[in-house]
Amino acid sequence: MAENQKLRILQVNKAYFPHIGGIESLVRTYARELQKRPDAEMQVLVCQARGRTSHEVIEGVPVTRAGSLGTYFSCPLSFSFFRYFRKMAKQADVILFHMPFPLGDLACLLSGYKGRVVLAWHSDVVKQKKLLLFYRPILRRFLRRADVILTATQGHIDSSAFLPEYREKCRVIPYGLDAEAYLRAGRRPVLTERLHDKKAVKVLFTGRLVYYKGVEVLLRAFAKVKGCELFLVGTGALEGSLREQAERLSLPVHFLGVLPDEELKAAFADCDLFVLPSVANSEAFGIVQLETMVYGKPVINTALPTGVPFVSLHGKTGLTVPPEDADALAQAIQQLADSPEQRAVYGRAAAAQVEQEFSEKNVLEQLYQVLKQKGEGI
């Protein structure tokens, strides 16, 4: 790359905004903010959930959505993706892949692309065991091909079935949060106004209602808790059974569904404590922890071997309990519910943790420095 030439970045992922998801939010932030740099030029290649190819410019970023026949084993089936990848890769100095995304691995390996490859590793393939049988050799070859592998925490490396072998290529760059944007958001007592008992402690969970989030365990724990009301934000395959469970146990639970962005921020700001009760390694980080901590709220999370307990720290910004342990979870909730003073101490530390360790501005600068460097094993 010439000294005054812009760094041409191609970012590859399964989906892009307005698709909702933690990784999709991250890809959008990387694309939008790096495109603003005078020394960078960004393009994004993703797939349609189903349907024909489309080309858009979103927030100043050119986005190509390759046509897809649908999604199978959590991966889009797209033949045109290979053609668009080959075409767009020719214009790129560096390609940033978000993983796992088997189609992206295969497209790169088949394309003959000789430029720089950076992998953002978000999680191992956890649930799709059949897919992994076919994907494993492709994945290992792609890991060997990569120049750098980015993870959000050391836990991502240590808990992975694949990354320890490539430890020398790994760089830890945490996910970031624009704290000012959250703190500027309008405040409204969206949880308080829904309380049945106005003196109750407001416990919040937000995320998809799927197996690895551990909401079934949270409801069992909540049956042992007093003086609290639980607010669940999100939808998913388990919503029906979770509603039945809550009704059967006569729990003070509010199912809020999907909230608009501003209302969701207000919910984070209005809660007394946040619970992330995840039970499987599919929960690799938990960005929602940062979204709560920025407002000075304590977090209760689980001791997964992933990045989750690296975000909110046990005994500093909240409490960490064993996964799938309803009794320990209930005890932790009750402990914080009964102690406003402890919630305040943890909350202040949580806000400071976001500012010091997870500043979006610092994260983006670290990312750009990795993308622009030349050669392997920087």
Image (cartoon, helix red, strand yellow):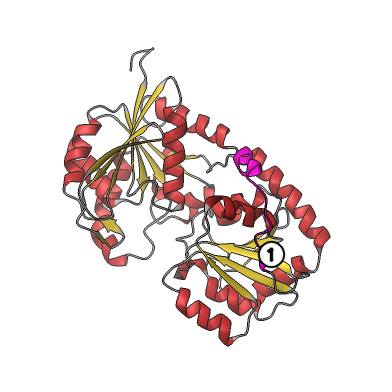
- Give residue 190's position: percent from left, percent from top: 65, 60
The residue that mark 1 highlights is 193
Does the magenta portion include 189? yes
The residue lying at 30 percent from left, 49 percent from top is: 140
Note whether 116 is above or below 322 in the view shown.
above
Quarter of the picture containing the N terminus is top left
- Magenta highlight range: 179-194
Note whether 69 is above or below 12 in the view shown.
below
Note whether 103 is above or below 62 in the view shown.
below
Q: Which of 225 and 192 is in front in this view?
A: 192
- Give residue 311's position: percent from left, percent from top: 60, 51
Using the rendered image of the protein, determine whether residue 102 is visible from the camera's viewpoint: yes
Q: What residue type is labelled 1?
A: Glu
**Quadrant in which residue 371 is drawn:** top left
- Tell me how many marks there are: 1
Label 1 CA crowd tier, 10 Å (few <14, some 14–19, many 20+):
few
Quarter of the picture containing the C terminus is top left
The residue lying at 54 percent from left, 82 percent from top is: 245
Left or right of 295 in this view: 214: left
